[in-house]
Amino acid sequence: MSELDLPDFDPRATRRAVRRGLLKTASLVLAGLLALVLVLVVAPILFQRGGTDRMYDVYATAFKMYNPGYRIQVGECCEATPWSKSLPLTATQLRAYGGFSSRTEAAYKITKNLFGGLDHLPLGNEANTSVARALSRVGHKDPIGKKEAREILAGLPKAMRALALVEFSRPATAEQLVAFGKRYEACPERIVYEARPGSLPITFGPFTWERSPVEPKSGWCYDNPPEILAEFRSWDKILQPSDTDDLRDFDLTLDRVRKAAKAGLAYAYLDEGVKVERLQKLLEDPQVLSVALIDVTFDIAKF
């Protein structure tokens, strides 16, 4: 065969070569599509799954502070999609302890989008609960007078339990609040750490921060204030300047949280199951500025 002679045409070899080319091209296309799927779907989901601790520690805690009129349970974090991640929770409106009452539990979510922002938050100021309205009067120049409170309490059975907001004439330290609680067998379950007339003040209670490093101590309810303050201060320490924008969505600012945690002064407190007769007694204490009756419970067996 001379150098210019061409080899015989082999159809079978040609078909094999074409098939190999097609398979190679298809493999490259599939690999490209898979990489695209990883970039557009899987990678965002993996990214969204990051920062779970911050969802629990910052957002869930801030949401409870944003909704002092509810008892909130936090679900398992997090529900992730390519474009967002959500923290599920349930909320039950705060009512007076004891007796016969209906408590409806509703499901909600805190959702953080792919761009790092929070979607519209449920409840909060829009819920306009009776607890929130009472709290917005702490520090008001025209508080509920003792005379009005006496008249309301006088018309109720002494054994009836109430959800009440007790405001002090002067902010109390944690130790002073313990002494006050012992004197009247009070239960400061949620403590108000600032006066912010017309708006919602900072309120903190046991388990507001669910992963708090502060070990709860067994004992009387009135012994809780030092532990609540320690938990509040511990939460304040984990906050970072990068949390500023997110806190604003919960009607909080880093400066306010820092100031309230450092001072550690109780302007008022919520008691969820205090008897009317106890409220009548503490109302006469000069340390008390006012008592706001928010809810009462009626026990059919007693009354």
Image (tube, rainbow, N blue to C red):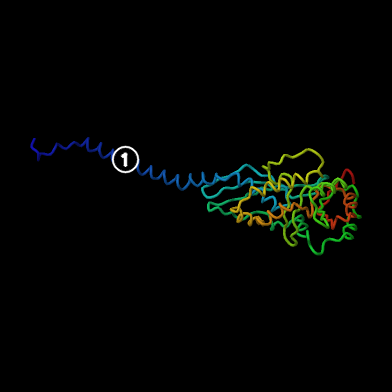
- Along the horizontal axis of the image, is 170 left or right of 72? right
The quadrant the N terminus occupies is top left
> Which residue, as the protein is rendered here, is positioned at the far left?
2
Residue lying at the far bottom of the rendered structure = 141
Question: Between residues 134 and 299, which one lies in front from this camera angle?
Answer: 134
> Which residue is the extreme one toward the front?
262
Identify the amino acid type marked 1: Lys
| Crowd band around label 1 with a 10 angstrom C-alpha radius: few (<14), some (14–19), many (20+) | few
Near-viewer residue (151 or 20) = 151
Instruction: Give x and y (percent) for residue 215.
Output: 72, 39
Residue 203 location in percent, x, y? 73, 52
Q: Is residue 207 left or right of residue 48?
A: right
Q: Residue at x 53, y 53 (%)?
A: 115
Q: Is residue 290 above or below residue 13?
A: below
Q: Position of residue 44 (x, y in %)?
A: 50, 47
**Foreground of the two, 147 or 184:** 184
Q: Residue 86 in the image: state x and y as whole percent.
A: 59, 48
- Count of marks, rendered view: 1
Q: Is residue 28 left or right of residue 66?
A: left
Dot 1: element: helix
Q: Camera-side residue: 207 or 43?
A: 207
User: In the figure, is residue 104 to the left or right of 142?
Assistant: left
Residue 287 position by quadrant: bottom right
Residue at image mark 1:
24
